[in-house]
Amino acid sequence: MKKTAGILLAAVTLFAIGACAGRKTEAGNIRVVLDWTPNTNHTGIYAALEKGWFAEAGLTVEIMQPPEDGALVLLGSGNAEFAVDFQESLGPAIARNRDALPVTAVAAIISHNTSGIMALKESGIERPRDLAGKRFASWETPLVTEVIRNIVEGDGGDFNAVRMIPNFATDAFSALETDVDAIWIYYAWDGVAAEVRNLDIAYLDLGTINEDLDFYTPVLVTNSAWAAANKDTAKKFLAALSRGYAFASENPAEAAEILLKHAPELDRTLVHRSQEYLADRYQGDAPRWGEIDPARWGRFYRWMFERGLLEKDIGEGGFTNEYLP
């Protein structure tokens, strides 16, 4: 759900960047960059827009498609006020130079990590150590390598026996049927899609396997400089957005229809099933939608630092709950 979107997305991206480059918004005008094409991670945004809660707060919200390499650069350069991104990609950006890229996470869109490793049941992969000798679809990033090393070795397996196959397929099922035995997915989309297809799969839940890997993904990120100068506007936006996600949690069927109205190309059955899956997971066990637990946030960043994935130990840095209602 967060890899290259192909030629169409690239074309949309170029248009979006060209249209907004150097453009400053007036007070109350908010640009939100998605991390990927519209899906159920974003339903709360569309619900708040459709229900008029942004307008009620005096806000005009524009939802934008992301650049091919992610939204953080666009956000940090002042060409958007908010973006959907991931704790795992936000950390390196902050560790390198926070002043050069002034971005801060302000809400957890989903309260716990719902990503993991999916394989067809016939592959024989039932636990992490079973990945040894199998072909794993790697995005060829240091993070992916270390996560797979951690869960395989933590289960007593031989990481060196895992065949890390470069694979950037946007269709997990085509990849599993042809090139690989296991692939990293977000269960709310590809896992639910497997259910819809009645496929017999094995699923290794990362946050359950290792609590250090129960990181926040995705998160809502803001331009820190903009938010500091526009605190009231930022709070109004988060208040309306929290209503959107509360609505999606309480009314998954209607929320699914709202998403489909804005993205009619999506599979209706998948959207409805995915919306049901996420309904009680947006807020989860958090005291309120969006709240980030400092201990869990910092635990993952320390895990990254200890494995050389961050240039410095940023601990609990990189997020704030101050804009949440």
Image (tube, rainbow, N blue to C red):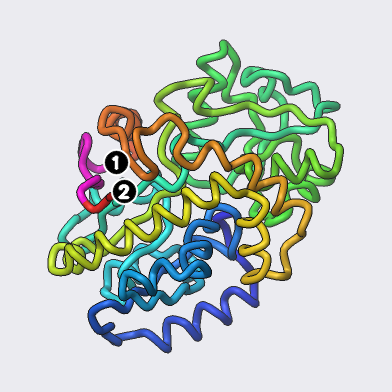
Q: Is residue 282 magenta?
A: no
Please tell me which residue is depicted at 78% across the width and 31% down the height of the picture: 201
Please tell me which residue is depicted at 65% across the width and 43% down the height of the picture: 276
Which residue lies most toward the left here?
Answer: 229
Tag 2 and tag 1, C-beta contact below 8 Å: yes
Secondary-structure class at tag 1: loop
Choose between 273 and 4: the one closer to the eye: 273
Q: Earlier in the sequence, mark 2 or mark 1?
A: 2
- Three-letter amino acid code of the residue under disc 2: Pro
Please tell me which residue is depicted at 60% across the width and 49% down the height of the picture: 251
Name the spot of residue 5 as percent of width and height, x first: 61, 66
- Three-letter amino acid code of the residue under disc 1: Leu
Secondary-structure class at tag 2: helix
Inter-mark Cα distance, 2 to 1: 6 Å
Q: Is residue 210 left or right of residue 168?
A: left
For label 2, the residue is: 92
SS assignment for the magenta stretch, majority: loop
As drawn, the label of residue 310 is 1
Please tell me which residue is depicted at 37% across the width and 54% down the height of the picture: 220
Choose between 42 and 221: the one closer to the eye: 42
Name the spot of residue 209 as percent of width and height, x first: 53, 20
Magenta highlight range? 310-322
As displayed, is residue 54 above or below residue 320?
below
On the image, which quarter does residue 183 sit in? top right
Q: Is residue 51 left or right of residue 286?
A: right
Choose between 52 and 16: the one closer to the eye: 52
